[in-house]
Each structure stands twice: as C-alpha cells, then as structure tokens.
Amino acid sequence: MIVPMKYQGQSGIASGLGQTNVAFATNLLREATFFRGTLAQPLPFREALAALYQVVVSDYKYRPRDRVAFRAWLEEQDSRFLASLGVKSQKARAFLERAEARRVELDKARQQRLRPFYRARRAFFDYIYEKEYELQLLLDPVITVHPDEISFEAFSRDESSYARLAVPYTWFDTIDAFECGTTNIDFSPRLHQELDRMRSYRRTEFHIEPSGLSVAVDGAAHKEKKIDLPESWVMGFLQVHSTMTLGLTHFQMAPVDLFNICRYLRRHKTRTSPRALRYELTPGQRGRAVLEPWDHVVELGEESCFTGPKALAVRTWGRNRLQILRRLLPVCRRIDVYLAGYGLPSIYILDLGGLTFTLALSGWTDNDWTGGAKFDLLTRRLNASAAELTQTYEALRQVRSATVAAIAAATGLGIEKCRSVLSYLCQAGRAMVDLKGQVFRHRDLFMTPFSAQEAAATVKQAAAAGNPHEQGAQAIFASDNVRIIARRPVTTGYKLSGSAKGGDGHRVRPLLHVDLDGQIIDGSCTCGFFKKAKLTQGPCEHILALRLAHMSRLEQEDRA
Amino acid sequence: MTPTHVRLFNPKGPDRVAVVSVEPSASQGHVVRLARGSGPGPLQRGTVFGPFPDAELEARFADVLANLRAEGFLPTGLAELLLNLESPEPAKRARAALGLGWRRATEAVEPILAAFPKAVDEICSFMDALGAIGDARAVPVLREQAGRKLLSRRRSAVEALRNLGDTAGLAAARQQALDRLPPPIRQLLEASDPNKTDAAPVQALAQAVLALDAQQRGLALDTLYELATPLTVSSLRLAFDDIAADQAHLWRYVKSIHKRALLRHDYATFGWLSHAIEAWSRDSEGTKATVKSGYDGVARPVHLFGRKTQNFMKRLSWRYLRLLANHRPDAYPAAAAEALVAYTPGDSEVPQGLFGQFASCYLLNRILWGTSPRLVLSEWSLRFRFRSSQDTQPPAQTREEAYPQLWDAHPRAYLRILGAAQLPEVQAFAVRAVETRHPEVLRSASHAEVLAFLQAPYEPTLQLGLKELERRFDPHQPDWLLLDQLVVDERPLARELAERWLRLTARLWTRDVARVARWLAVPHAGLRSLVAELTNASLQTDANLRIALAQHFVKLLRASEVAGDTADGFLSVARAALLDELAPLLSLEDLLAWINRGPVPTLAIAGALLGRRNESLTEIGLEQVTRLAQHDIAAVRAGVHQLLTQQGSFHQGDPSLLLALAESSWADTRQTAVQLLRGALRPESLNLDGLLGLLDSSHVEVQDLGQELARQRLDALPADELTYRLVQHPHPHMRRFALELALQYLPDGVEPLARLEPFFRTALFDLWPDRLLKQRVLAFLTQRGLRDEGQAGVVARILGDAVRVQGRGDFERALEGLVRLKLAFPDLPVPVRLNLEGVA
C-alpha cells in the first residue's frame, strides 16, 4: 500500500529571544486540519514528542547476525592449518612463518591506510540511511485535532509498538483557532533534534497547519514522500484499538518502578530464554515485576495494589521496548498498566501531569499486531449493516468523542450493537478508543471519505476473513455439539465450564470467563491448540463455541 | 576449380547414365570426356571435347554439363529424390524433400509446391526444404503457413521465410509473435533496443520470462528466439541458466528452439543448446507427465526427455554437422567450432576403465576424434571408450578430427576456438593446427580476436596471443587502434599488457589531449588511475599541455560529458595538476552553476576551485555561502570552509554567519564555524540571550564553546537566571555545567530549588547515567534539604523516589540524605521510618 504525503512547508522550530514557534506541516493531501495555540508547559511536551519519535523509529525485530565474514575467516584458518600439515621441512616452515608475519604486518598497514576510507564510507552510509529512511520508511505520525485535545499517534516500523500522545486543551494558555480532523505531520529526524530546543522560558507558539514553518526547501515548493506501507502495518494500527476494547487486567505503578525494570534490563543482557517480564499480582497486595531468566524481582510501589478478584501472574515479552519510555520517566507522575493476558499485548499509559502518553506493545516483538493473536475473536461482535455503520459514524463525527452509552442513545441502537458497530469502525480506521478517557473518538485514518459502501465492505470483509476457529465455533454451535456444564455469575461477569466436540470428533472441556458484555477475560481448554498456543493466537474454536452457547442462553433468559 | 568428374542420370533415357570427366591432353591442356549409356555396366558411347587451355577448361566443362541438363540429365541422386516426392509414403516424401533442400535443388521447387496442397505430415519438411532452397516462388504458401497456430507449421514457415529473406512476411510473423508474448515481456521488448545486448535489459527480460507460469515459459522462450534479435537471443541464453528443460510444457519448446537453430543455421545457438541438451541428459532420466499434444490436442501420459529422446537429440546434432560437411562444407568448421567452445571442464567425468574423462561428450568426440581408430562408440549408451588400454594416449603426428580437410580449408574457425574454448583439449587441438599448419591465420586475425586469446584457460594459447600482440606492437610507433581496444578490455592479462604499453608509450600519448581525455574515462579504475598518474607526471613539465587539457576539461564539463563512475580519472588530474589553469577559465557564476547543477562526481573540483576564489563573502552572497557550507558534497563544504577561513576578518564585525553555521548538521562545517567563532566572538559582547544561543545547541562542540564563553562572563551575567535556563537543556553533555552553576549560583529557598526539581530527577533517573553527576546531585540535595524545612520537603520528594532505585550506591546515598533530613526535621513526611531506640 503506497501512502503518499505532500507537504507545502517543513515542520520545524524557530527560536527567538522570547518566543519559540513550533510548527508542524500537515499533509496537503488530507482534509484541512489546523490548530494554533500557546503551550503552557513545553518541557513535558518536548519529552513526550521525543518518546513518540523513538516509537516511530524503533525496530526491535530479531535479525540474526551476518556471519559471512566470520565463516570466511574460519575457512581461511582451516585451509592454513591444512596447508601447514603438508610442510615438512624446517626451512620451509621458517620461511612460511616469516611470510606469515610479514603478511600480518602488511594487513595492519593496509587497515591503517584504509581507515580514513572506511570512516568516510561509514559516514556516507549513515547519511544515506538517514536521508532515505526519512523519505521512504519513516511514516509520519497521525495527528488528530479533537474538540478537547490533540492526539499524536504513531506505530513502530517493526509493527509491534503503538504510541499515542494526547495533549488536552488545558495545556494551552491560549487557543487561537482550530479545525477538528485527522492528518499526517512532517516528522523528520532533523525535527526530532530541533524539538530539543523547546524551553519553558520562551513563549511556545504551537501551530499545526499546512505551511508548517513556511520554508521552501532549495526551491522545491513541496516535499513529497511516498511510503510503501505494508498492509499488516495498517491492520496492526487498527488492531490496537480492538485490543483496547478487551477486558484487560489493570494496575498502577510508579515511574521509579518502571525505571528499575528498564535499568536492570539495560545493565543485563541475556542470551538464554525465557526473556519474559512477569507481573505477579495478588489482590490487596503490592505487585511484583519479575525479570526472567534471572528471576530478578522488582517490588512495585504502594500504588500497585491489585484490586482484582484473584491472584494473577501474567508474562509479557518484548520487554526491551519499554526503554522507549526512558525520557518520560523523570517527568512522569503515574503509570497505568493494562495487561491482556499471557503472551498478549500490554498497554502502558503514562500520566505526565495532564499529558497522556499511551504505549501499546504487542505480545512479543516478532509477533506484530496482526501476526498471531486474533484479538477480534476475543471480543463479541454482532453483525452490523451499512446503515447502522453510517448512522454511528455520523453520530460520532458530530460529537467527535463519546462513550458507548452516549452513542447508543444518539443512534437508538442497543449498547451491545453500538459497541459492535464502533468496533467495526475502529477496524475500518474511522474511530479510535481512548482507553484513559474510556471514550470512543472520531478519527479518519485514511484519506478517502467514509462511505456506506466502504462500511458494508468492511463488515463483509471482517465476516469473510473469519478465522477458521470462528467458523469452527459456528459449526460446533450449529450442530449442537457444545454444552454448558456449569455457569457461575461472578462480579466481573460469568465463569463457564462446558464440553464441546470439534471437527476432529474429540470432545474437550473448555473453561471461559466472560464479562457482562460477552468479552473474553480468560479462557482455557483441553484441546491441542490451546495447549500449544494458549490465547496467544486467539481462542480455540471450543472456547468460542462455549461463548456462543452462553450468549444464546443469555438471549433466552432476556426473552423470558 | 573444375571437378574431376560428375555423374548424371536421366530417368527417361534412352541413355540413362552420363559421366563427364577431365583428363590431361597428350599435347597441351586438358580434354573433357563424356561417356554415356543405358547403364548399369560399362558405358557404350562417348565423346571427347578439347583439348582446352586451363583457363577455358572450367567454362567448357560447364557447357557440357549444361547440354546434358538440357537433355534431361540430372545429378545422380537428385532424380531419385524428385521421384520420391511422388511416393505414396509421407515419410519418404518428407525425406526426399529434405534431401532436395540440402542440395538446394531449384528443380524441386515446382514439384514440392505441387505436392504441397495434399501434404499433411510431411508439410513441415516441405517448408524446410523450400526455405533451404531459397526460391521466392515459395513465399505465398509459406506466408500462409506462418500464420498457423500449430507450432511445427508456424516454426517451419517462419524460418523458411527468414532463409528466403522475405521482409514483409517476417514483419507479419514478428507482429504475431509479439502478440503471443505475455504483456510484461512485450512491454520490456518495446522499451529496449533489440540490437543491443546490454546486461540490464537482457537480465530484465530473462527475469520476466522466469517469472512466468511454467506453462507459459516455454512458449515465451520459443517466441523470443523466433524474434531473432540479439537482445532476445541473449536473454534466452541467460534464462536457460535457471531452467530445467526436462519439465512438462518446456521440453517441446527446447526442441523447437533447437530445430529453429538448425533451420536458421544459427551455429552459436546450435552449439550451446546441443551442449546443454547433452549436459542435461547426464543428470536427467526424464519426466513422466500427461501433456496435451500440439498435433492432435489429445492429452497423453508421456515420458519427456527420456533416454531415447536424449540419444536422438545427440545424434541429430551430429547428423546436422555431417550434412553441413557434405552439402555446405564451408560452414562445417564454424558450426563445429561453436559446438566445441560450449564444452567446459565441468563436462569431464572421472575416467573408469576404458571410458575416458570425456566418454559422455558425444559431439565433442565426434568432432575432435571422429576419425580416430582408438575410440569405439557404444550405440546403446552413446558413450565412447578406448579400444584398448594402449589407445588412451593420442598418437603424435596423426590427425583424428572429423573432416580434417574442411578445417584446413577454413582455418579461421580455429581463431574462434582459441578465443572462446574452455576445454584445454579443444584449445590444444586449435593451437596445434595454428602453430603447425596455419600460422598465417594468426596474422590475419583482428585485434579483438587476438585479445580474446588472453582469457584462454590454456597457457600455449595465452603465449600465442601475447606473442602475436607483441609482434603487432611497436612502442615507438604504437598501433593506437590496438591500444584503444586494449585499454577497454576487461580481461586481467589484457589489462596488464595495457598497463605495460601505456607506460612504454606515455611520452607519446600524453601529448594528445583528446586521447588523454578518452583514456581518462576507460572503464577499469586501475587503468584510469594509471592514465591519470602518467598524465600528471607529464603535466608537471608541460605548461601548454596543462592549459590545453584544462580547456578540454571545461569543454567536456560544459557538454556534460564528465559524469558517472568514470569521472575519477579527470578529477584526479584536475586536482593534482590543473587547478591553477582551471581557475581563470571559470567565472564565479560558472562555478556556482556547476555546483548547483553539475554532475556530482565532479563537484570535488568545483569545491577546490571555490576555495581559491578571491571574491568577498558578500559578493558571493551570505545566503549562498550558508547554503554551500551545508552542501551534501564534502569537497564543496571544504571549499567554503577555506573561503571562510581566508576571510577571517569579515567575521569580527558580524559573526552571524558563523553562528548560523555552528548549528549545521554537518560536523565539518560546525567545527570550522566553532573554530572561527573562538577568534571572532568577544565574550564581553555577549549578553545572556547571545550566550544561550550557543548553549542551547544540540551539538557538543557548540555547547563547549558556549560553556567557555559563559565561564568568562559569569561575573557579568545573571548567573541564577542562566542556571534556571540551562537546567532545561535535554542534552546529557550540559548537565554537569548546569549542576556546576546550580551549586554556585542557585539562590537559597524553596522556590529556586523546586524550579530545578525536573533537572534533578532527569539526572537521577537516567538510564544512561553519569555516576559522578548523580553523586553530586544527591550530596547537593541533602545539603540544601538540611537548610530549612521547606527545602527539605522538596528534597524529600526527590530522594523518596531515588531511594526506591535498585542501585546500591544511589540507594545508600538517598537513604542517608533522607535519614539526615528526618533527623533534622522529624515531622517531615519521608518514606523512611526511624527507629531511634538504642541510638546514643
């Protein structure tokens, strides 16, 4: 997917004696969106933008080391050794040793002579990399001007980290003008450096507008970028919001707790598995973060007292990505942590004294958001018609942000229906979830305007793309091969135990914990798929079939 | 040359046999004797014509033959073949037509055309024969058949039209071929020059073919060969490197290409494809597949490229060469040479018993040792073995190749072998022939042909080539054409020779500006460097040459002819020897235009020349200077640095240019600007904002300069305000200086301390910490906290977090601080509880 971007000016910072102008140039190909105001506290904002940049450029995917040179060296050693075996005479040996010593000497001299060349070549490659990276790979963040806040969203190149920076309007001394909407902003490595010049002793004018700093670069009136964006990247961006609608385990931690975790990780490298970060949460007690394989324990602060119903131990991977947040730790007040489960995504929301920085991490670094876990299977979604999608979209666009209840009231759709429709809209890039504010917000991720046809296609696609497990669950439910053995209401919803017979003819025992909205909080099964992958690749067909049976039972009870 | 005798046959009699022969006359010259009769047996009647002088003999002999042809006599065999065209057996008719085709018997055209409408299975042979005979009467029927869908018909018709030179028919066939090709290939063909075989388009075309479905690939390859352009044939050969021909949907097209090569007498393709088929047959047992017949459209299970087919193809190649030897003897050596050069050392195998290392190389054995009694062919496996163990070594003076007389008649074929053969045995065959029997052929070889010897994998061939080249070369009167070819030759040996000759003739060619310019752009970097080195040496002593070369260089530059990867030769000469001459030839405008639009590799010179300009910075324009100082090319920046340094006094009055450049993203420009700023900036002229302009930089060297200046001016500046501002700097490099200021100048009280809280937190909670800085921060905080309860509150907040850090040093210091605070202010809320019982 080629994403074109066109900027009239450049984003940049112009610092005078008493004033700094921070101007973000917006994508001319997107809807007209602008904002003009004066920032009240530029420093936390500066740090947050630096962290956002770290997310944009971060790529933690594992890449094996290139061992070609080492193998060549090894082969050379082998051949030398073998050749030396054939040399019998002392005279020849002495000659060879002298020749070898001379060769080493010459090699050193050559290395010395070529050192400036290697240095220049390295510098050249760095220059090319930086330049090309910006033009071809760096996907500019998405900025959305809401009626109550400005949000910057970015997704890492390795498709494993998502970040959202929300700046409320209370953070501005004055707001001169704004137009709600979504666009991209020109965000280069150079700008990242310039942002470091923001200071609180200068008045910071903050502008988001097409002209940016109104600088035409080298006579070129426009700067154009065409990013070849993988489909998975876009899907991942959308999937994040699907995850945020799950029933997540929540607790808080102090910034110094996260600092301790990051500090230990920075000082210790491991070459052996497991490399998980395990959170151990016990109701009413302070949480613990355990770093594997050393089993190093970081006792979390008092704020981490867990309020859940039972003790949990959740393992998350890809913990090095937390170091992205390093610049935020000194200015952060509090961290809210949301965990989806074993090997599933984790979300960290940093409170910077009003600014909110959300970092969502996929289950592990190589498991991008679309790779393994099928989060939409964990949620319960009803089918939605094109008309319902359009109606909900329009309602959300009008108010820009609202709770599910408010939207449901405005559209006349039921809460469940409304939640499902909003979930589809999130998946189509037309809405987003604000986890901190517990609201849905309008956000058009794509340039094309919303249309009923597109909406219908999205729903159809979502249905057609149905995971085989989902189809299997439907088949089990339709053939009456699933039974609820026990159903126990708990404070968070229901706990279910059942029996299901899948396509392979084996009867298994799924267990399920769903909330009152039908979203899966936890689940387990005795089938092979679950034993192998747990929930990291989404729930198995038996768990899903049990949920279908449960929802059917609820519907009957409602009617009764 | 008059033949010694010709036998003729007249099927309608009464005399059915006639023999025309030439005999020496008893007096002078020769007589032509004609004997005729009903045959077989002794001929009853005869006539003697002559005697004729030798000069007339050929014409008289032809007259006698013409008279006999007029009577109805035909050369022996031809008549039978013509009769066979009317045979009831299609196979016999087909063979007869092919035979007539090889004989190029124009008498057969009408009978073939007459038989054409009823022909079915033999129709392809008829068309092949018509193409071989080359009579234009066949064009209409061939054009009609060229439009057929059936591959065999279309192939024979198109190749026959090609042999007939029918441009219009071929154009129509070409269009049909293009329409048949998949769109990606068609587009590539339309975008490329068909007569050029540059690597890029050839590779692109080959890749496009390989990217096709297996079912389309074969037809695309055959169609490319049908188009018969250098581009398509080269890409075809390249594509075959990655193809296994024994696959369904492909083998039939490989066969088709082979057949086309035979019909077209494309010996190069014939040679490599025959060899490729032989090579494939060594590794493949064939493939079983169900494929649809192109003949009747019925799908049948077949064994593709099985043993029988492999043997048939090998025999077919040799049969073709034999037919060439018999009917086109002039062409045999060239075709055989192409077949020989395709063999590589990879074709050899481990000798086993009487089977030598080339036992499986059928065509090689046939050509190279075809008349040798030492070798015996196994008809079943088509492998050659030595007759006995005594026969493994070739006899010294005996020629063993097939058709030795044809090789002797056309010895130029040896040159092809010497220049291209990869097998030492084949090279030895040609070297022996050239050295012993045909030394004259070496003298007649072109430079390119001799240069090709230098890549031969056979030492005597290399020596032969080098000897010949040395013979042709005279350092006092060099053959410039030969040198021109040698310097662009990429073969290492040729390059070595070129280097030696360039050195030997340097004093001659360095006088010729055009030649120097041409050789400075040769493809090999090493040679370019040598040319530049020799030119530089010559330029040192020759001012006129320098001026001429500089003018030529500017001319080339203006014509945009100095560009690309080969510009380094020019650049080397220009930098080493021509800068003084180039400078006056270019105005400032020229230079700036060159820098703005010129080819990137040449900008190094432009930068060097820019540094030599005498114009002031204002003349050039400060904006222009700022832009050039941040140019992507280091040499241009270096030129500007030189300009800036030369005009140091300019910056004393107005350092704004340097201040702007100090923030450049290029380290070299920053360093130059900072260096010049040290001299240009007077500390007393800087106020707080001016200093902060430097201190706020993200670059360490600028920060250092700012720190230096700040230290000199601290007494005159509001140090507390400077501290408040500097602690906001996010760069770790500034923290020590900021702390230093805070230690000295931070006013007492809660409010000033609280303003620095983010700074202290940043220093303490840094993942890449400065240990000394942390220690000093903790000590400072403890000290300030002890002053009053208000400050203690601020400090307790910070230390309260610091004490939770899992580092022993930090923990102990923070804890100590907190304890001391708690002891000093017992009511202070700190996360530490003191148990003072028992403490004295």
Image (spheres, coloured by chain):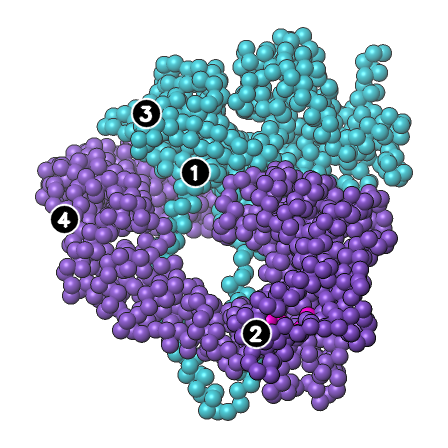
Chain colours: A cyan, B purple
At a point 66% along the width and 23% down the height, the residue shown is: A458
Give the CA separation, mark 1 to mark 2: 92 Å
In the rendered image of this protein, does residue B358 appear above or below residue A353?
below
At a point 85% along the width and 51% down the height, the residue shown is: B301
Give the CA separation, mark 4 to mark 1: 41 Å
At a point 83% along the width and 11% down the height, the residue shown is: A559
Helix, strand or loop: magenta stretch: loop
Location of residue A486 in the rendering, given as x and y in whole percent from the top left corner: 85, 28
Residue type beneath disc 4: Pro
Chain of the residue displaying label 4: B
Which numbered disc, 3 or 1, marks the residue that appears first in the sequence? 1
Left or right of residue B702: residue B732: right
Have a look at marks 3 and 1 and say if they share a chain.
yes
Have a look at marks 4 and 1 and say if they share a chain.
no
Location of residue B112 in the rendering, given as x and y in whole percent from the top left corner: 74, 50
- For residue B744: magenta? no
Magenta residues, start to end: B1-6
Residue type beneath disc 1: Glu
The numbered disc on residue B33 is none
Is residue B375 or residue A232 the one in the foreground? B375
Mark 4 or mark 3, which is nearer to you? 4
Q: According to the image, label 2 marks what residue?
A: B52
Location of residue B302 in the rendering, given as x and y in whole percent from the top left corner: 83, 53
The numbered disc on residue A214 is 3
Residue type beneath disc 3: Ser
> Mark 2–mark 3 contact, CB under 8 Å?
no
Mark 1 or mark 2, which is nearer to you? 2
Tag 4 secondary structure: helix
